[in-house]
Amino acid sequence: MRVLVVEDSPKMASLLRRGLTEQGYVVDIVSNGVDAVWVATEESFDAIVLDVVLPDIDGFEVCLRLRRADRWAPLLMLTARDDISDRVRGLDAGADDYLTKPFAFEELFARVRSLVRRGPHERSPVLEVGDLALDPAEHSVRRGSEPVQLTPKEFALLQYFMQHPGEALSRTRLLEHVWDFAWDGDPNLVDVYVGYLRQKIDRPFGRSSLETIRGIGFRLRNEIADAPLA
């Protein structure tokens, strides 16, 4: 089993190499993000241990570039920052697991073993429905090549629609997942925000992908897939 370690601290890199080697892994070490992207793109690894703080591009960017290059080796991120937003950002970028420094090496080894057992599995961080693309890590939306600017709540609503393409979603379900499980306000708020989304992702492009399902709620259609054959 071959593991790539991306760590700019020589001492930590040495400790990781020694520990992982003792666990039976073949270990390659790189000390910066650019080299990590190149090596992981050119070579095949059973797992990647990636430090977030690197001297050039950070670990989040490394992870994004690898996933966009269709490199799906299971990836464990290491960071000294114990911030929930950093963990969310890492997972959104395509990481499989996250470990905060300082950590116990026994835990790191256990997590690497778990990732290796899982194996590579394609899971693009970018959601796509037709020519509509949403990138949670960059917090960006595009219709074709055109960027679409959304508020945080509009973005969250569209993300939920894109996670369930073609499904009829009730107003209650949308409220529970995009607003709050205990929300007791006006359910018509969903209609208002769907209207906002239509003004931004559909009407400027001559589309009608956000469809009202009478008596149920709304559905995001894949207009390209749903289009009749000529």
Image (cartoon, rainbow, N blue to C red):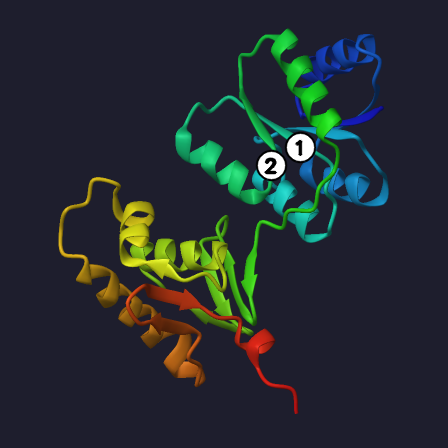
For residue 188, side relative to residue 199 (left or right)? left
For residue 199, side relative to residue 121 (left or right)? left
Residue 65 position, x and y percent, is: 66, 48
For residue 168, side relative to residue 152 (left or right)? right
Relative to 159, is 102 above or below?
above
Residue found at x 53% / y 76%: 223
Relative to 198, is 75 above or below?
above
Res. 2 in view: yes
Residue 122 position, x and y percent, is: 69, 46
Seen from the viewer's position, the closer of residues 66 and 123 is 123
Residue 116 position, x and y percent, is: 74, 26
Characterize the local packing of mark 1: few (<14), some (14-19) or many (20 or more) Cα atoms within 10 angstroms: many
Relative to 134, is 113 above or below?
above
As drawn, the label of residue 5 is: none
For residue 106, side relative to residue 171 (left or right)? right
Seen from the viewer's position, the closer of residues 73 and 8 is 73
Q: Which residue is mark 1?
A: 75
- Are dots 2 and 1 in contact, CB under 8 Å? yes
User: Which three-letter amino acid code belongs to the residue tagged 1?
Assistant: Leu
Q: Which residue is mark 2?
A: 95
Seen from the viewer's position, the closer of residues 174 and 91 is 174
Task: Residue lying at the far front in this picture: please name it.
Answer: 215
Judged from the image, the secondary structure of the residue bearing numbered disc 1 is strand
Characterize the local packing of mark 2: few (<14), some (14-19) or many (20 or more) Cα atoms within 10 angstroms: many
* Separation of residues labelled 2 and 1 (CA atoms): 5 Å
Judged from the image, the secondary structure of the residue bearing numbered disc 2 is loop
